[in-house]
Image (spheres, rainbow, N blue to C red):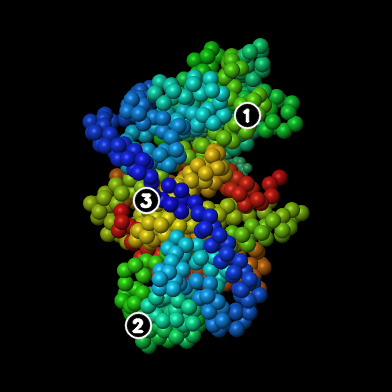
Amino acid sequence: MDFRLTEDQRALSRGVRDLLEGRFDREALRAAVDAPALDRELWRELGDAGFFALRLPEEDGGVGLGLPEAVLVFEEAGRALLPGPLVATHLAAGSVPGAAEGTVVVTEADEGLVPWLDEADVVIGDAGGAVPMRSVDPLTPLHRVPGERGHGEGGLLAGGDGRLVAALLLAAEQVGSAGWATEAAVGYAREREQFGQPIGAFQAVKHLCAGMLVRTELARAAVRAASVTADPVEIAGAKLLADTAAVGNARDCLQVLGGMGFTWEADVHLHLKRAWVRAELRLPAARAEEAVAAGL
Amino acid sequence: MDLSCTDEEEAYRAGLREWLAATLPGLPERPDPLDWPGRRAYDCGWQRRLYDAGYADVHWDASPTQRLIFLEETELAGAPYVGANFVGLLHAGPTVAAEGTPEQRARWLPPVLRGDEVWCQGFSEPGAGSDLASLRTRAVRDGDEYVISGQKIWTSHAEVADWCELLVRTDPGAASKHKGITWLAMPMDAPGITVRPLRTLAGSTEFAEVFLDEVRVPVGNRVGEENDGWRVTMVTLSFERGTAFVGEVVACRRLLGELARTARKNGTWDDPVLRRRLGRLSAEFRALWRIVQANVSEAQATGGAPGAGGSVFKLHYSHARQELYEAAAAVLGPEALDLGRDWTLDRLSSLSYTIAAGTSQIQRNIVAERILGLPKGR
Ligand SMILES: Cc1cc2nc3c(=O)[nH]c(=O)nc-3n(C[C@H](O)[C@H](O)[C@H](O)COP(=O)(O)OP(=O)(O)OC[C@H]3O[C@@H](n4cnc5c(N)ncnc54)[C@H](O)[C@@H]3O)c2cc1C
């Protein structure tokens, strides 16, 4: 047993981080917030980099990697707060033409919500009668499907494995976001001075930051292990802990940033809002908890 | 990331399972927590069985993975708890294994594995708990002996221990309080030692005050250099926080399963709030086990003792375990007030988890300063 990343996995992680830092840095993020449209060019570049075809076999033109690699890549996407229906398009690669290459944008109706409906070329699941919402996340336009429809049942991606993989990849994004929030809080706490010293020297602040790391590590261990075992109960647990980490860390980060944290200018609200959206998609807390309990 | 075990490891697991299945039935109940001599005899008897069957060396001679398999399988099977052997097997022994001389290893380690000798931990003092380095128990060199005077407190199992991993101040004039400390192995039958049991809130006398009045300990019992005891202490604490509770995570998972069965029987399972609470706890204990695997992999790769990462684990583990017993109380209802139920004593004992082995506040300081690099407080 060696529950550490292999050298290749580390390199993949670093590579994706570099790619995203170059292609979707903070400036691009803020520009996207100001003009929320899906960047098709970026989508294609992600496709070229193998983001969507990552798990497709090489003979089908894919990268031929597995779920453990996919969670590392999606963790980086979460860290960078990359917008768009990433998980649905990734899952559609191989079955929806163009998805693997990033020339087609695929979204999915899930839990009664449809992200990016107007921008998508293909919609999986039943989005009939979907009405637009004023989405809390400025980078995720949302439609609501009326009634009880779309609760993750049916649809191309919804059955069996696809459903679990979607939950796990969302969880991986949550972990990336939770890690970002920890770094942002710690970085600020080292610099910002009050009462003649960095606020990070105050125990009340230190303890918030320590709690953020603990949440992230717990969720990260759960997500990575679940990517190896692909065990349904473990995946449900991973989603649950990752949702808790992403939402909790964004809130604590906001607190550490003080008044600055409450502004539109600080990025932390974008992470919090996205974390809320992801937490509502694919196995929200109540059902994840039930799924794990059923395994007892 | 590879969670699988080698064929050799799987064979070890299978053999252990078989042995446990043959050995556990018919094992007597562990004596009452008020009967420490009885518990010592019981715990050492169990250790002796492990030794005779060839399973004891797992604690410091086997690979970390094999050790995890051992802890996982023994706990899953509901084998007896390490109990009185906790300190010797899980942190004093590993410290001697890592820092002791060949002679020290040969003298102290085999009796721990055989269940012949029990250790206790003499770190805390009335004036030095969280601020451990401010300890005042003095040791003055007299020829090839140290002469020790002072007082220790909260010393678990002191009543029944043969040896004590003892921290003493050997240089009161050192430039910093961390510099003048030395790590010694003290025989508990040496003249000048008085043990006065303290009663815990659970009613047992599991820890004690230890008074030291000119106790003589050979210089050869020193692990590490004189005045270099703080470094050795960090090794001990990294085992105590990093790996000593590993088996108990598995025990918690087993207890959760038991709790779910109880809940299904008594109808509380129908309450979705309670069910969901158990589900979340289950997810947390599964993830804690994964953190253990990650920490062990890291330590195995670097060949060192578990680092500050142990604090991340200890922080969440101690909290989650307390939450587990609170959930258990909700499942049991009024029965949770009955001291005759295992869960009730466990619930009381669990109140110490966020205090013993370094309080949660201290662990947060360690995580913030040593892992996250935040500035030290004044
Ligand atoms: C069941 C049990 C068994 C034990 N067994 C042993 C043993 O075998 N051997 C041994 O040596 N010791 C043992 N201990 C002692 C244990 O390590 C100490 O109790 C612990 O380190 C706390 O020290 P203290 O009790 O002096 O509390 P204090 O240090 O006085 O702390 C009191 C409170 O103040 C807080 N506090 C203190 N300093 C800080 C700070 N810098 N920042 C924030 N908060 C702070 C603490 O978190 C705590 O809430 C045991 C304790 C228990 C409960």
Residue B73 in view (yes/no):
no
Q: Is residue B71 above or below residue A49?
A: above
**Label 3 SS:** helix
Q: Residues within 10 Å of mark 3 (few under 14, many from 20)?
A: many
Task: Give the residue at mark 2.
Answer: A126
Label 2 and label 3 in one chain:
no
Disc number for residue B327: 3
Protein chain holding label 3: B
- CA gap, disc 2 and disc 1: 67 Å
Ligand 1 contact, mark 2 (Cβ < 8 Å): no
Residue displayed at 31% across by 76% down? A154
Amino acid type at mark 3: Ala
Disc number for residue A14: none
Splitting the image into 4 quarters, where does residue B137 fall? Answer: top right
Residue ranking furthest to the right:
A196
- CA gap, disc 1 and disc 3: 41 Å
Task: Give the residue at mark 1.
Answer: B229
Kindly check if marks 1 and 3 are in contact, taking CB atoms under 8 A apart as contact.
no
User: Left or right of A92: which side holds B265?
Assistant: left
Image coordinates for residue B264, horizontal then vertical, percent: 25, 54
Residue displayed at 40% across by 69% down? A57
Which quadrant contains ligand 1?
top right
Residue displayed at 43% across by 47% down? A1
Image coordinates for residue B207, horizontal then vertical, percent: 47, 28
Q: Nearer the viewer, residue A9 or A134?
A: A9
